[in-house]
Each structure stands twice: as structure tokens, then as C-alpha cells.
Image (cartoon, rainbow, N blue to C red):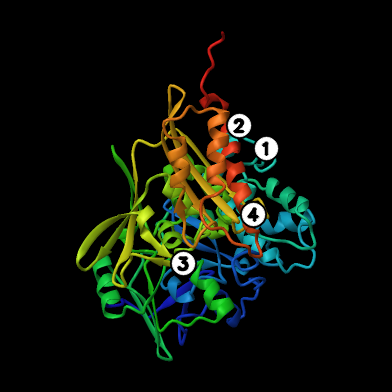
Amino acid sequence: MTTTSAPCVTVNGDQVPLTGVASHTTTLDWLRGRGLTGAKEGCAEGECGACSVLVARPGTDTATEWTAVNACLVPVAALDGQELVTSEGLGSSSDLHPVQQELAVRGGSQCGYCTPGFVCSLAAEFYRPGRAADAEAGSCDHEHGPNGVDLHALSGNLCRCTGYRPIRDAAYALGAPSEDDALATRRQAPPPEPRPTRIAVDGAEFVRPESLDETLALLTERPEAQVVAGSTDWGVEVNIRGRRAPLVVAVDRLPELRSLTVGDDVIEIGAALTLTEIERRLDGQVPLLAELFPQFASRLIRNGATIGGNIGTASPIGDAPPALLALDADVVLASPRGERVVPLADYFTGYRETVRAADELIRSVRLPLPLAPLVGFHKIAKRRFDDISSVAVGYALEIADGDVVRARIGLGGVAATPIRAVATEDALVGQPWTEETVRRAAAVLAGEGTPMDDHRASASYRSAMLGQSLLRLFHTRPETRRQEVPA
């Protein structure tokens, strides 16, 4: 692998070298060490948004999109060759950015600790190419403003003193970027191309290979390597548990892992696509995933988290696996020996354990077509958004002439791995889609898995929520029920 130039990051228009940067150094720590202290560390887990910054990423509607990410999670080495804007780069005390101006005049800041993070997250929404179209469509409710602003852009930002009304008012007061707005103009040119990177400091290395083949060869040579994409999981391990990997291999920009194709019999989603990219590219073509995305953490996390990473961590409480299990997803694993396709239902073997070998990499996820017409994703958590689930359930059912002819149900949070609710599926298939059938099947569903007591929920609560979930699906989709013929 060769690098074309010394590692560096363009920060607020200035090229800054990555000199002496350890592989685990977060973007937040690096920025603050350089005196850019607008971004703050609040939680170090990607939950508060005080560390939000903007990164130039490939766009769906424009060549470049300014994307808000959690600087506390992303290794700064992963931004080699890329462009970054902090709150200081958006405006100054004598020349405020429109977002900063509206937050100031509408009382959207008190102590100010969280404000730079809100500024960057809201600036990403300010520059979102689709916002103008949303405003023209006139879709306005309690979560969307008349100017097209989607408040979910701020779902990963917390404020402890101001309250959210003045922040919302500031968001809804924003107009369109001016014609001389440099960051708006920048969207028309492509973002920097990903480039190979190798940084070695104090015996630890960060490597961004140039191709999938090079990546697989490296994993074969160094099976202990820590693979990262969005780093939304490993970043927490670094910050909270002090994990230090001898070798970090970044795969988030590998072209072979970033395609999305919709064919006649399958949808294939590249493992390194972020959840935000998938959501926008699919644009509702997979209704079950469309239900999942808004409930998956926050927009800040979805801007970094990848579908391959959520499967790869093999967490029993990951949100994507229950939905993907319901969709009968397959996982495509690549290695120097070639590729193999593994049904997701067979992929997990134990707590955070899978069939993936050390020299294998998740290349893509495949969803067979046609999709089941009756779907639902239910996430039971203490908060509606940006929370870890106590129980997650994905449904994909096919009803024909009032009878259940096919059923797939994926569960999370009730066993050591994500699982299929096979007994419940069997209790439904071949039966009329009626309340009597659903109540019997709900009793079966309540007994699926091996739920446990922990700080999020008790085992009995988890079991009760499983049964209630199926009843909820039935009662919220009355159009699917068998039509009774009057006597």
C-alpha cells in the first residue's frame, strides 16, 4: 500500500497534518488539543451531541453533503484527506452563521456547553439538499417545520438548561443559504476521494487499505486487527473502557462495500453504507427498514453507523438484526478464499460470537424479493428515540384470503443473540388472521427466547412486551384482517 502524501485533515479550510497521532485518538480530543474547543465531551458515547462536527461526505442529491457526526467516536486518523468544519469554522462573534444567529436571538443557548453541537447538527440540516423540496411540499407537523427542517436532525443533541422550544424556534426560523455561502457552494463539487492511510505511533497502527483484496490480505496476516467503519461501537470501547487495539483497519470507504442495488429478486446493500445513506437511497422501498431507521439511535449516530457494523458487533440488542431476520436477510462474507452467503438466522452463534472467520469481512446484506406486505418494527425502550432497546421485534407476514401463509419474526433483547421466533411463526402459518389466532400466537411469543433481568428491564417485562407486540401489530393494521361474511 502506498500513500500519496503525509496524513492530514482539512479543518475549517486549513490543511492540518496528523503528526504523532495514536490510532485511538478521537477527532474530538485532537481538535481540542489544537485549541478548537467549541466541540465538547459530554458523554463520550455519542448520546449527547456536544461534540458534533461537520464532515464533507458523498451526497445523494448533491455531489457533497455536509454530514454531522460525533467527533468523540471517530478516530481522527479515519479523516485523513477529508474536510472537516467545526463550530468555529461556521462563524465568529463578529460574523455569525445563520444558525448561530437564530439560536442567539431566540434564546436557544444558556450555559452554552451544548450549543456548538446543536449549531453543527442544525447546520447539517440547514445545508441538506432535500430541505427546500420538503418545504415546498408543505409537510409541517410537530417534528417538521414550514421551512423543511426535520427536527430529527437534532435527536442526538441534548440540552440540560435551555429547553427545546427556543431551539426549535431557531430551527424553524432558518431560511435558505445565501448565494455567497461558501459551504453551500462547496456541495456542488465532489468530496475528497478516500486515500490509503498508514499511521504508526507507539507500536500501534491505523491502516486504511486501498481495496477489498488488500484489506482481506491484511486481515489474514493480522487476525487480531480491529475493523472499524463508523466506529460508533468501538469508539465507546475506546472512551469508556480504555480499549487500545494494536492494529485498526478502516473499511468505511472501500468501494466494494458501498454499493446498493435493487434487482428483480434481491436487494443488495453494501456493508459500509451508513444507515442514513441506506435510508435515503431506498427511499421507502423496504417498508420494514423505513420503520426501523427513525428508531435507530439518533441522526448523528445513523450518519456514521453502518449496517455491516451493526451486524458485525453481534450485539443481542442491536436494532437492525431483528428487522433483517424478519426480512430473511443473507450475509455475504468475503475472504481471500472467495465469498460465501450465510443466512442471518445462522450467522449468530453466541453472545457477540458469529460464524465469521478472522480473515472474513461482511461485504453486503441481501434481502430477497418480493417483500412481505404486512410488516412492523416495534422497539420497547425507556425513551422513544436515541435509546437502547429492552426488546425489539421485526415482523414480516403475508396474508392471503384472510389466512397467514408466511411469517417471519425477528427478536432482539430476549436471548444471547438476535433470534427468529420460530415457534410463533409456526403458530401463525396456516391459521386465519383473527384476534383469536393472534392471542394464541402472542402467548407463544411471550415464551420465546431466554430473557433476563438487567438494569433496562426484567425478564417478565420483556416476555409481556413480546406478547403485547403481536397484539399491537394486529390492532394497528385492521385492513389485513379477514372480512367476516354477515349471516
User: Residues under labels 3 and 4: Cα distance?
Assistant: 21 Å
Packing grade of label 1 (10 A; few <14, some 14-19, many >=20) is few
- Picture coordinates of residue 38, whole percent (x, y): 65, 71
User: Residues under labels 1 and 2: Cα distance?
Assistant: 25 Å
Kind of residue at badge 4:
Ser
Which label sits on residue 141?
Answer: 1
Label 4's element?
Answer: helix
Kind of residue at badge 3:
Tyr
Assess whether mark 4 and mark 3 are in contact (beta carbons under 8 angstroms).
Answer: no
Upstream in the sequence, badge 3 or badge 4? 3
Packing grade of label 4 (10 A; few <14, some 14-19, many >=20) is few
Q: Which residue is mark 3?
A: 351
Q: Is 120 in front, or is 150?
A: 150
Upstream in the sequence, badge 1 or badge 3? 1
Q: Residue at x 57, y 33 (%)?
A: 474
Is label 4 or label 1 in front?
Answer: 4
- Asked whether residue 424 appears in the rendered view, the answer is yes
Q: Residue at x 56, y 8 (%)?
A: 487
